Image (cartoon, rainbow, N blue to C red):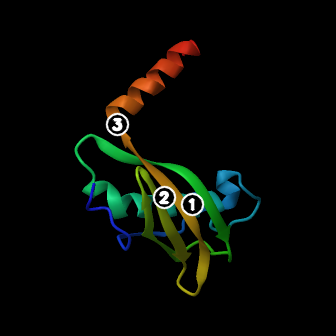
């Protein structure tokens, strides 16, 4: 995991459709790009920045967000999210995230992810489900 160094970036874009709006997702009652969808793009960009560099059987999971949604984006515009790895602290990775539409910055903040062993993580989840009778 020595390949994980600050400066790594990931980017993802999408054209805002009705299914990406606050009205559709239930996070508001307006037909503009939804905050939860913006956060999802920021997470995807963070995964793209680092997961391909992890050892076999390891991935990252989101563990923290501090994000502001700065401006509304109408249906039909393209939104691009960019993530930059800014800190590596053992298994904890901190990213600076931003989102832009075709005219302006619409979001910014930080996103924290943790590196996990997928098999061990899955086992813990299964044990939790069993304890809950699920």
Query: Which one is earlier in the sequence, the residue at label 3 or at label 1?
Result: 1
Asked whether the residues under the numbered discs 3 and 1 touch, taking CB atoms below 8 Å apart as contact, a structural biologist would say: no
Relative to 94, is 102 above or below? below
Would residue 34 be seen by someone viewing this image from the given angle?
no
Element type at mark 1: helix
Would residue 129 be seen by someone viewing this image from the given angle?
yes
Relative to 9, is 60 above or below? above
C-alpha separation, residue under disc 1 versus residue under disc 2: 6 Å
- Left or right for 59, reference 63: left
Which of the two residues, 92 or 50, is positioned nearer the viewer here?
92
Q: Residue furthest left?
A: 56
Where is residue 20? Give x, y as percent. 58, 60
Residue where numbered disc 1 is placed: 39
Where is residue 82? Give x, y as percent. 45, 72
Crowd class of label 3 (few under 14; some 14 to 19; many from 20; radius 10 Å): some
C-alpha separation, residue under disc 2 versus residue under disc 3: 18 Å
Element type at mark 2: helix
Asked whether the residues under the numbered discs 1 and 2 touch, taking CB atoms below 8 Å apart as contact, a structural biologist would say: yes
- Left or right for 96, reference 51: right
Residue where numbered disc 2 is placed: 43
Quadrant of the drawing holding the C terminus:
top right
Residue 33 picture quarter: bottom right
Mark whose residue sits in front, 3 or 1: 3
Query: Which one is earlier in the sequence, the residue at label 2 or at label 3?
Result: 2
Q: Which mark is residue 10?
A: none
Q: Residue at x 35, y 70 (%)?
A: 8
Where is residue 53? Give x, y as percent. 26, 57
């Amino acid at each position: 995991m020595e390949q994980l160094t600050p400066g790594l970036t990931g980017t993802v874009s999408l054209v805002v459709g009705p299914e990406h709006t606050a009205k559709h997702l239930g996070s508001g009652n307006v037909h503009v790009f939804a905050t939860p969808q913006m956060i999802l793009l920021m997470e995807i960009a963070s995964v793209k920045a680092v997961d391909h560099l992890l050892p076999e059987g390891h991935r990252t999971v989101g563990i923290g967000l501090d994000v502001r949604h700065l401006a509304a984006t109408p249906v039909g515009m393209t939104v691009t999210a960019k993530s930059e790895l800014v800190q590596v602290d053992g298994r904890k990775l901190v990213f600076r995230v931003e989102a832009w539409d075709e005219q302006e910055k619409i979001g910014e903040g930080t996103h924290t992810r943790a590196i996990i062993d997928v098999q061990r993580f899955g086992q813990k989840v299964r044990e939790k489900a069993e304890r809950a009778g699920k």
